[in-house]
Amino acid sequence: MIVLSTTQSNKVVVTLREKSTLITPYYTWEVQNQNSLDTYVFSPDNFSLSPYYDAFTISIGTPSSLTSSVTLNLVPGEYHYTVYESANQWDLVITPTSSVVELGLLFVLATFSLNDIVSFTESNDDTIRVFNEL
């Protein structure tokens, strides 16, 4: 699951290389809003210097580019994302033969806090009832 904030640039770190079949892969992302079914395709630069993970910068706002450093016009909500590998840099064409290297959920939040994702309140008033079979 990826969580993006609308108030700041987001560094997205994923492990795509371990599933790639190309020696020098480039990645094209497809993001689909689950309410409106609007689809966005973009190809950000991979800024990772590590052989173990990939890092991308994705911002939310007025679109300036769908390649390199990417700014997308996404509304807060839930999205599904699919990442395809490509032999060509900044390839925005997804064909039936495109190889999928990752898919998952992406959430865009207007304000970001870890408490928005997971919250648990501990209380001394919690009661656990145990029943035994008779």
Image (cartoon, rainbow, N blue to C red):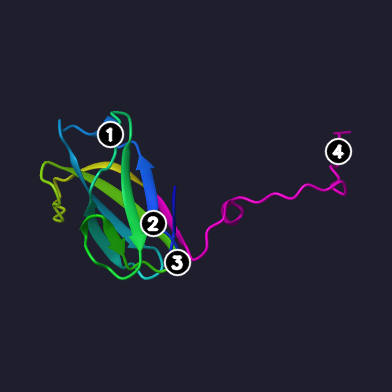
Majority secondary structure in the magenta region: loop
> Pointer 1: what residue?
49
User: How far, Cα to Cα, is label 4 from label 2?
Assistant: 51 Å
Of the residues under marks 3 and 4, which one precedes in the sequence?
A: 3
Asked which secondary structure carries label 3, the reply is: loop
Q: Nearer the viewer, mark 1 or mark 4?
A: 1
Query: In the rendering, at what x and y percent does residue 8 appear?
Result: 43, 59
Q: Amino acid at mark 2?
A: Ser
Range drawn in magenta:
105-134
Please tell me the numbered disc located at residue 131: 4
* Residue 117: image tag: none
Circle nearer the viewer, 3 or 1: 1
Relative vertical location of residue 128 with respect to residue 71 in this rendering, above or below: above
Mark 1: which amino acid?
Leu
Q: Which residue is mark 3?
A: 76
* Quarter placement of the C terminus: top right
Task: Give me the disc on residue 9.
Answer: 2
